[in-house]
Amino acid sequence: MDKSRDGLDEVPNVSVFTTIPNRYATFSADCPEQEIFQDVYVTRIQLPTHKSGMFDQIRAFYTYYRAVIKQTKNQHYDLVYASSSRLFTAFLGSVLSRKKNIPLFLDIRDIFVDTLQDVLKSKFLKIGIMPVLKWVENWTFSQASHINLISGGFAEYFSKWDVPKTYFTNGIDDAFLKESHDLSLPVQNSKVITYAGNIGEGQGLHHIIPQAAELLGENYVFQVIGDGGMREALESEIKKRKVSNVKIIPPVKREELDSIYRKSDYLFVHLNDYDAFKKVLPSKIFELATYPQPMILGVGGYAAQFVQENLENVILFEPCNSKDLMKRMNNFAYQRIDRVIFKEKFKRSEVNRGLAQSIISIA
């Protein structure tokens, strides 16, 4: 990197281009546009506000794409690393790699084309968009020097690309590992079940929470913290069923969310019942596993297999099946535990050590 950039006296070894947190139009986080951490130079790009709609997200990505291309134009790099839950972040990494003629390491957290095939309802949009996206996908992944897949469920899908692959999962940040938790059992009459995150088609909360709230009754209270494109659908279903034991709370900052988790009786994760989601491994599972409360997980496929093999104190049920959830809740012996083995195995430092070796091997 050019030493003269913004008056830097020394050249950072790593340049990170990301965005200022922008998932919800109803929530914004204050953080600087530029920061330096030892030898890491971070640039955060301000995106236009959006409501998670498709065209809003296209506009937001285009803003990000243009800013990154502009800011990297006259800089020298040895390798591009792109972490992508959305295909076009990986595509941007591929463009930079090709422009600079340097290796590309892709860290893939979701299969965008596969997911969109399930989530997209309009046949006309599918006919117009999917061929283009499949071309972009093939071009992007063919450019990679190495691909890391965070879920073993992705293996078959990515077998079509003859590129070296690893399978390092999400990791648990040190901030979660340093916290101590109260293992004593709760005494309140109503049990609080907390979900925090995006309220979108992928999570399918409108297919499970109002229905489960109705079946479980007033002894259980669901609190949903977040926002997203399917919030109205969730609210509509709550109103339709006339349930009063579901509360929707706007997004909160990390510190406040931690306090809410601690006061909860159960922590909740759910994915919609689509074939594409049988391949994924939600990162939220790793975060919530650091808390002692039972986890209620509505996931299938590889994620369900991973949970059964690695986690204790879990209520695992079929996605979108409120009757299955109720049955498993009724047969569950409540306890709070410290998942010591899981936290040690999947702490970020351990995962990153292996990931770093893979990156170094192609640099």
Image (cartoon, rainbow, N blue to C red):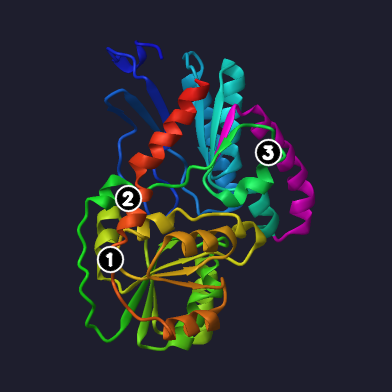
- Locate the N terminus and report the quarter of the image it occupies: top left
- Residue 145 falls in image quadrant: top right
**Neighbours of disc 2 within 10 Å: few (<14), some (14-19), many (20+):** few
Name the mark on residue 137: 3
Is residue 173 visible in the rendered image? The answer is yes
Check disc 1 and report the residue beneath it: 260
Disc with the residue nearer the chain's start (2 vs 3): 3
Label 2 to label 1: alpha-carbon separation: 24 Å
Report the predominant secondary structure element of the magenta stretch: helix
At horizontal 40% and vertical 41% (from top left) the residue drawn is 351
Check disc 2 and report the residue beneath it: 344
Boundaries of the magenta span: 121-148
Above or below 32: residue 119 = below
Above or below 164: residue 284 = below
Q: Seen in the image, is 22 located left or right of residue 301?
A: left
Question: Please, what secondary structure does the residue beneath circle 3 have?
Answer: helix
Label 2 to label 3: alpha-carbon separation: 35 Å
Give how far across and how far down residue 222 sits, in percent: 39, 76
Disc with the residue nearer the chain's start (3 vs 1): 3
Above or below 131: residue 280 = below
Q: Seen in the image, is 129 located left or right of residue 200?
A: right
Disc with the residue nearer the chain's start (2 vs 1): 1
